[in-house]
Image (cartoon, rainbow, N blue to C red):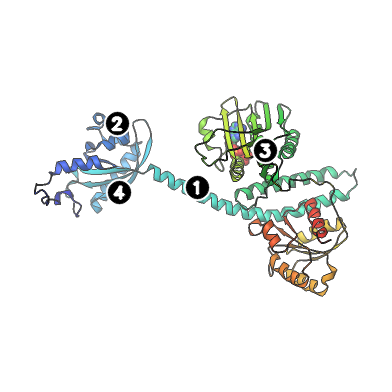
Amino acid sequence: MTGSGDIRHQTGHDSATGKPPPDGRERIESIYRAAPIGIGLVKDRTLLEFNDRLCRMLEYSREELSGSNTRIFYPSDDEYDYVGKEKYRQLREQGTGNVKTRFLTKTGRVLDILLSSAPINPEDLSAGVTFTALDITRDIQREAQLRQVRKMEAIGVLAGGIAHDFNNILFPIMGHTELLLEDIPADSPFRNNLNKIHAASLRARDLVKQILTFSRQEKQRPQVLIMQPVVKEVMKMIRATLPAFIQINEKIDARCGPVRADPTQIHQVVMNLATNAFHAMEGTGGELTVSLTRADQISRDPKTPDMSPGPWVCLSVSDTGAGMDYITAEKIFDPFFTTQKPGKGTGMGLSVVHGIVTGMNGVIRVTTEPGRGTTFDVYFPLVSETEDEETLEVTDPVPGGTETILLVDDEPDIVSMEMQLLEWLGYHVIPFTSSVEALERFKTAPELFDLVITDMAMPGMSGDKLAGKLLKVRPDIPMIICTGFSQIMDQEKAISLGFKGFLYKPIVMKDLACAVRQALDSQA
Ligand SMILES: Nc1ncnc2c1ncn2[C@@H]1O[C@H](COP(=O)(O)OP(=O)(O)OP(=O)(O)O)[C@@H](O)[C@H]1O
Ligand SMILES: [Mg+2]
């Protein structure tokens, strides 16, 4: 062995005391004790010397390890043979060896180990080899976690992109179906089929929402929200779809106050939890109980120290189904974790719920017992009712009008769909698929138009640029912007750019009708 780190070369007297230094044996023993890693000496595959750290690492006593065959370290014969061969190959070729392997402890735990070795005598490997064993289990786990996070990010970006395009495909399907439903006679034999198409496209839209929420591309639209009507609406859907062998109980306290939330997200939370509850009872039947109550205090959670002190609104979804063992329960919030058959569950449901709830500074508590059932308690911070913000209001009739609208979107399908929707509402529409041409047309007769509806992302001139130019021509022209990619635009930004309204695609007729009427009326 060579190198300045070699113990045997370091002689010389202590300059302060003049005493000779401790001999090699004492020094080596002191290093054995000090080292935060396992150290040992092996000859003929037999463990001759080792430090206490190695005993603790492998969970054996000194007596048990002393003189044992090193096979005892390894989880399998293969691993033992591989390490032996690889180590000696490196020792012969490089003088020292470094092998990543795994050790098996006495109680059966498997550790990831970096095993480094050097021969006592480089000329004669049979004279014995010293080794150090570094436990790298944690590092390997951390690496795996990091890889998982990166993978999730990549999937998020990919899924978000697909969802965005998919939205544009979905939009005309939904819109044309709505138009047909409005137009055909009440007793038409096609009504049933159209209703089915509409219901399916709404489900597809919800799925896209899930994906966008997960990939964080769906901007939340939180508002002061009374949750009862949203929960009741979901329960209505659930009642309509669940089989009769599941009894549904609803305990909704009408008085528990508002929370700050996006109604579609609350919808997603209830829907996901209730669907899981149903799956847990699918084979056996049972009871699904959904309750909404006020909780003034909940126990503190050491994992979330900066939890809001309350009061809370507690949404509780509980079932009398299969329940979970603790190994499953630990993983349920992991993206793509599912115990459903391949092709059935995505494993995204609870990841989305978790993302939404923590995004609202809420807390989720799970109580479960195999064979007895599961309860998810979701706590949302209560907002004081005096906060003067508009609460969710539901306006029923679809408002129309007769004004003239300049409509701009680079997708011909979307233009034709929106045009039909608007014409059905009574408006006169002048459509464009090019923002440059739309601007030219507007300049020729600015007073002709009462409203402009434009897409955001367009080649040539984007919606916000177009808006700036239109406002220069006519500063009082009301405008609405539509966008599918909510990252680059939100309500506040739209208003700051001079827009009167802001719509996410795919647009439902009612949202469009309300936004158009509101923008027009804001001028009056
Ligand atoms: N109420 C419940 N009872 C028993 N197990 C549950 C319950 N809720 C969730 N789980 C377990 O957690 C797993 C993950 O749930 P999650 O909602 O994330 O995905 P999923 O339901 O499997 O798939 P998807 O929601 O996409 O249909 C489920 O596969 C199931 O094993
Ligand atoms: Mg689920």
Horizontal side, residue 25 vs residue 476: left or right? left
Q: Nearer the viewer, mark 3 or mark 2?
A: 3
Q: Find residue 334 and name its label.
A: none
Which quarter of the figure has residue 140?
top left
Judged by depth in the image, the label closer to the viewer, 4 or 3, is 3
Q: Which residue is mark 4?
A: 98
Q: Position of residue 312 (x, y in %)?
A: 63, 37
Which residue type does callout 4 highlight?
Answer: Asn
Nearest to N terminus: mark 1 or mark 2: 2
- As helix, strand or loop, the secondary structure at mark 3 comes to helix
Instruction: Say what amino acid the circle numbered 3 marks.
Output: Val
Question: Percent position (x, y) of residue 490?
Answer: 67, 57
Please tell me which of labels 4 and 1 falls first in the chain: 4
Q: Quadrant of ligand 1?
A: top right
Mark closer to the chain start, 3 or 2: 2
Task: Provide residue 182's location: percent of width, then percent of height.
Answer: 86, 49
Mark carried by residue 60 = 2
Q: Is residue 484 visible to us here?
A: no
Badge 1 marks a residue whose secondary structure is helix
Q: Secondary structure at mark 4?
A: strand
**Which label lies toward us, 4 or 2?**
2
Q: Name the residue tied to disc 3.
A: 270
Instruction: Tell me the distance, in whole angstroms, between the alpha carbons under discs 4 and 2.
Output: 24 Å
Mark 2 residue's CB less than 8 Å from ligand 1: no
The correct choice, above or below, for 457 with respect to 398 in the image is below
How far across and down, in percent of the image, does residue 267 sit?
69, 41
Q: Quadrant of the C terminus?
A: bottom right
Question: Does residue 10 appear left or right of residue 308 in this picture?
Answer: left
